[in-house]
């Protein structure tokens, strides 16, 4: 039993002594925290189109107005669904609703309503040709954007550039202050997308844009930016 206790004490001594000895010979080096940030922007073509078509009806009877909207929307849906093919073009309904109309005295004089159809995809020709054939609806808005894959690729590229710039700045700052290097502290990475939306049309008849021809469309560019901010410990 005595030998066991001595062996245990010796083991503890051998494990703890080198640590204490090392700390005495190599005290902790001073560190300095520095905050910095970097950003990168990648410009990419917009590859997704969202085209919204709508129609409006009004009358004295709510049910009659609703039926008129339904007929117009059903006719457009029947035609548009024939051309639907994901991811080239998807078809969905948008807002559909009625609201009362009142005169100056607050008396109910009728009802008005609107219905929307949304065409979305990456085949701009297919979408514009389909929209041109929907005679019961008019173009309400045209919005260009980025598909999920296009956005992800742009963000990845911008992120790599922003991180590389962050690391380069941290190394230069450490060297300028006479430190050998740095370690990372708290880091935050933020991404955002911005870009022009063009062209746009509000309540424009498809047939008035171009008789029996596709709706003219031209995509723009989106700017995907990534910002890297945080702190580093110089050492």
Image: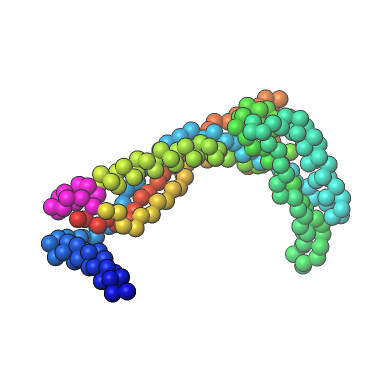
Q: Nearer the viewer, residue 119 or 40?
A: 40
Q: Which residue occupies 28% across, 71% down?
A: 3
- Residue 42 in percent (x, y) is at 40, 38
Read off the magenta span: 170-182
Q: Specify whether 104 is left or right of 39.
A: right
Quadrant in the picture for residue 131: top right
Q: Residue at x 76, y 30 (%)?
A: 82
Residue 57 coordinates in the image, percent (x, y): 78, 47
* Location of residue 68 with respect to 125 vertically, above or below: below
Please determine whether, in this image, residue 176 is positioned above or below residue 76: below
Residue placed most toward the observer, 58 or 36: 36
Left or right: 169, with 48 as reference point: left
Q: In the image, is residue 93 above or below residue 97?
A: above
Answer whether residue 119 is magenta in the image.
no
Q: Where is residue 110, by image quadrant?
A: bottom right
Q: Is residue 105 left or right of residue 193?
A: right
Is residue 12 visible in the rendered structure shown here? no
Say which quadrant the N terminus sits in.
Answer: bottom left
Residue 216 position within the rendered picture, expressed as x and y whole percent measured from the top left: 60, 29
């Amino acid at each position: 039993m005595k030998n066991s206790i001595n062996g245990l004490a010796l083991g503890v001594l051998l494990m703890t002594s080198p640590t204490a000895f090392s700390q005495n010979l190599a005290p902790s080096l001073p560190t300095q925290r520095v905050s910095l940030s970097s950003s990168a922007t990648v410009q990419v073509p917009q590859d997704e189109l969202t085209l919204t078509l709508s129609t409006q009806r009004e009358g004295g009877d709510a049910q009659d107005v609703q039926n008129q909207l339904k007929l117009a929307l059903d006719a457009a849906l029947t035609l548009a669904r024939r051309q639907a093919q994901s991811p080239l073009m998807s078809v969905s309904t948008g807002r559909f609703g009625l609201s009362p109309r009142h005169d100056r005295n607050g008396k109910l004089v009728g009802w008005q309503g609107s219905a929307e159809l949304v065409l979305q995809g990456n085949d701009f020709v297919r979408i514009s040709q389909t929209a041109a054939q929907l005679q019961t609806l008019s173009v309400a808005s045209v919005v260009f954007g980025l598909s999920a894959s296009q956005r992800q690729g742009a963000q990845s590229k911008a992120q790599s550039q922003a991180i590389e710039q962050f690391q380069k700045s941290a190394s230069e700052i450490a060297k300028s202050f006479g430190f050998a290097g740095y370690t990372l502290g708290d880091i935050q990475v933020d991404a955002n997308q911005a870009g022009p939306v063009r062209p746009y049309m509000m309540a424009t008849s498809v047939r008035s844009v171009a008789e029996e021809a596709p709706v003219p469309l031209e995509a723009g560019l989106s700017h995907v930016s990534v910002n890297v901010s945080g702190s580093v410990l110089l050492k």
